[in-house]
Image (cartoon, rainbow, N blue to C red):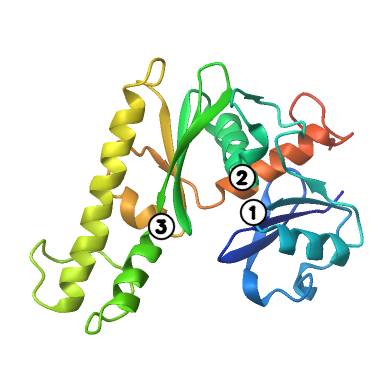
Amino acid sequence: MKRILLIETGNTNTRFAITDGRKIGRVIFIPTAKLSGIPHAIGRYDAAVLSSVVPAVTAKLCRWLPVKPLLVNASANLGIGIRYPQPKQIGADRLANAVGVVNLYGAPAIVVAFGTALAFDVVSPAREYVGGVIAPGLAAMTDYLHEHTALLPHIDLREPRSVIGKSTVNAMEVGAVIGYRGLVKEILAAIRREPGLQRAVVVATGGYGELIAKKVPAIQHVNPLLTLEGLRFIYLRNSRDWKDGRTDE
């Protein structure tokens, strides 16, 4: 059975995982700035699919890989349509998320990706990527406060015990977590007012997806592996083993 390497390179972290076409195995995280090659723990693989939003790292990964990777972009055979004025501007991770959500949850759909940036990606009832929203990431907001104020510390985000902070750290947790939920709720509500999107399924992914989603009723599913799942489906669609949505036994 073939072993396919899935690579998702973001601005902060790069994730590596092996799939046999049916399920995704253990995921290895490496800070993107510290990448120096393909992790030895990956073992052997027969093919590779790469989603990257860091062009300089994309070039390095292509040199390090012993096989030519399938690069995810708007020109690839994704299995979904794209209705967007300049498709080349769409990040590979956003396309992978759109593919993953359509195959796992259907359409219309909205993906809320909690990464270095907060990205909302919208798939129409016709299974077309139609655009989205980009806002500052949660960590970026808290890091900004720490880096630009003399007395505010760096914090590890968690659910606040009270909406009224009893310390500087508590107050920052409230502002970050509860305030961020307000941002997410308002953007989702606005997107769902668009034609055809009232019943869109909403799926969260990314580092803070579970923390924020737990008290946002509009988010119906949390899938930390959504981007990698999208890469898996893209490989299957472009592989000779692909037949009616299944790999050969």
Helix, strand or loop at label 3? It is loop
Helix, strand or loop at label 2? It is loop
Q: Nearer the viewer, residue 3 or 170?
A: 170
Q: Nearer the viewer, residue 73 or 248?
A: 73
Horizontally, is 4 left or right of 178 in the view? right
Q: CA distance from mark 2 to mark 3?
A: 16 Å
Residue 14: where, in percent of width, then height?
64, 64
Instruction: Say which mark, if any, is on residue 53.
Output: 1
Which circle's residue, 2 or 1, is located before the other in the chain? 1
The amino acid type found where label 2 is placed reads Gly
Instruction: Please report contact status of discs 2 and 1: CB closer than 8 Å, yes or no.
Output: yes
Instruction: Say which mark, if any, is on residue 91.
Output: 2
Name the quadrant containing residue 137. Answer: bottom left
Q: What's the residue at 35%, 77% (across, down)?
A: 147
Q: CA distance from mark 3 to mark 1?
A: 15 Å
Horizontally, is 223 left or right of 95 in the view? left
